[in-house]
Amino acid sequence: GHGSHITKEMHQLAIKNNIELFCLPPHMTHELQPLDVGIFCLLQHTWQKQCDEVLEATGEEIMREDFINQYMTACTKAFMSEIIFKAWKNSGIHPLNPH
């Protein structure tokens, strides 16, 4: 809902193309998007560690042809069921915590 996110042109384009815009309340991302905080933050840290490990082992950055395999290795480490469930629980979304 921030003014810089919705412009008059964007609003008109959405209407023209039958797109419904949905604005989240301000300062609610951590509660409405628990995976942003609980999972993707961890993925970012895990990805950085994966890159550092490759650099340390090879003396070179990840090669283009190895990028996807290395990234998926980081995803496998970060996207664990118990962490995902904990992110949803901590947000109060599931199981629903009305307080």
Image (tube, helix red, strand yellow):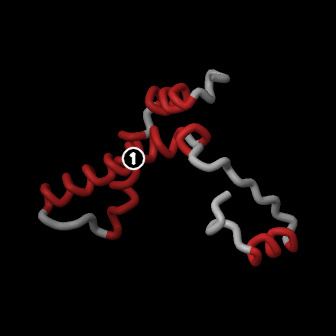
Please provide percent x and percent y for residue 12: 82, 74
Please provide percent x and percent y for residue 64: 33, 70
Please provide percent x and percent y for residue 26: 62, 50
Above/below status of 48 relative to 60: above
Label tally: 1
SS assignment at label 1: helix
Above/below status of 53 relative to 35: below
Point 76% across, 75% down: residue: 8
Closest to the observer: 13 or 65? 13
Relative to residue 9, is residue 94 drawn left or right? left
Position of the N terminus by quadrant:
bottom right
Q: In which quarter of the image is residue 29?
A: top right
Point 35% across, 67% down: residue: 65
Relative to residue 6, is residue 34 drawn left or right? left
Please provide percent x and percent y for residue 97: 63, 22
Position of the C terminus by quadrant:
top right
Relative to residue 31, is residue 10 drawn left or right? right
Q: Quadrant of residue 66?
A: bottom left
Which three-letter amino acid code belongs to the residue tagged 1?
A: Leu
| Residue located beneath label 1 in the image | 43
Point 57% across, 37% down: residue: 31
Closest to the observer: 75 or 2? 2
